[in-house]
Amino acid sequence: MSYSIIIPHYNLPALLERCLKSIPRRDDIQVVVVDDMSSEENRRKLIEMQETFPYAQFVFCEKNGGGGAARNRGLDEAKGDYILFSDADDYFCKGFEFLLDKYSAQDNDIVYFNANFVNTDTGEPAKIPNHVAEIISIYKKAPEKGEKLLRYYFGEPWCKMVRRSIIQENKIRFEETKVHNDTQYSYLVGFHAKKLAVCDHPIYNYTIREGSVSRIVSDDRLLTRVSVFARKNRFLQDNHVDFIDKMMLWPFKYCQKNHKNDVYKRCVAEAQKYGFDEKFIKKQLQRHRIKSFLFRVQRKICKILGVKIPQKNLAYS
């Protein structure tokens, strides 16, 4: 088996069907759908869907464990030499399998592909920044900087083709958290992969949809975000990787902006568990404010002069 494509699913049968239709039926492509305890009605729809896609393997979880648990279950079922992931509400580009064949033949450990960001209803380009395309653009101009961003900043599991033996040998799993459950997987495969390739051609359509989990903000999600990224930064520092993911700072900025002092203190306590005290956090926030201010000034000057306006540095967004 050449490839295993793992798709976690929760109550989106129509969009899942669109995703499955975008994957060609081939003997060397294993498709694993992991249903994370959808409603009884939607589980019945998936059972019916098995007749339309008999080559896909449907796994039904007995409890709702979230996206991380579903992806881990998919890894347990995977048999392919390479692993890919898709979200149920996204879908692949036509002919993407030929790019998989091209890069798997080169014996890469990990391959990073480009993505389209599209409106889920119309398929038209979405009006939000495409961080995947931006990172790959940086890689083409400054390979060392771009490679670091791909390995340690690009946090989603899709658009990555990873050799399964690397995942197995290093016991890499997804965290079973409410948000950012894919962060640990992404930086660990980036860290352990030796031979890397980057493809500028999109293989994946990332869809923008209202009500997705990643767009919900709550106190427990703020704390989880601090925990996930503080743990990530501790791992990177302990392994002498010169990179700090500023995503750890976002909950602190959010709390300050929205006057959530109690949650701010809880976030500080969470960061301290991984060796990042309030002094470090305030220093990083101050650096971020200075860089953001200088960036705004730069944009205004460029606008006045009528020259190309630069994009914001990903590491400080």
Image: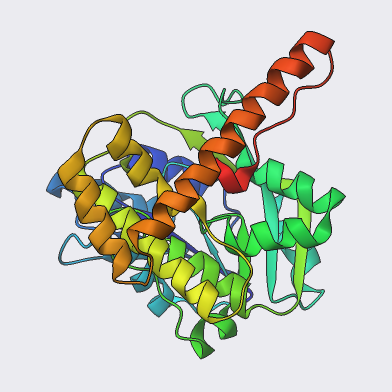
Q: What sort of colour scheme is used for the picture?
A: rainbow
Q: Determine which quarter of the picture holds residue 158.
A: bottom right
Looking at the figure, which quarter contains the C terminus? top right
Tell me: residue 298, above or below residue 1: above
Q: In this view, does 19 lie to the left or right of 194?
A: left
| Residue 59: x %, y % from top left | 31, 66
| Residue 4: x %, y % from top left | 54, 69
Q: Is residue 229 left or right of residue 241?
A: left
Q: Which of 84 and 2 is in front in this view?
A: 84
Asked if residue 101 can be seen in this view, the reply is yes
Question: Residue at the spot x=69%, y=54% of the render?
Answer: 113
| Residue 137: x %, y % from top left | 78, 44
Tell me: residue 262, above or below residue 107: above
Asked if residue 30 can be seen in this view, the reply is no
Q: In this view, does 261 lie to the left or right of 168?
A: left
Question: Residue at the spot x=56%, y=28% of the render?
Answer: 128
Q: Which of 232 and 103 is in front in this view?
A: 232
Q: Determine which quarter of the picture holds residue 259.
A: top left
Question: Residue at the spot x=36%, y=62% of the render?
Answer: 228
Tell me: residue 296, above or below residue 219: above
| Residue 264: x %, y % from top left | 24, 47
Question: Residue at the spot x=50%, y=86% of the render?
Answer: 168
Looking at the figure, which quarter contains the N terminus? bottom right
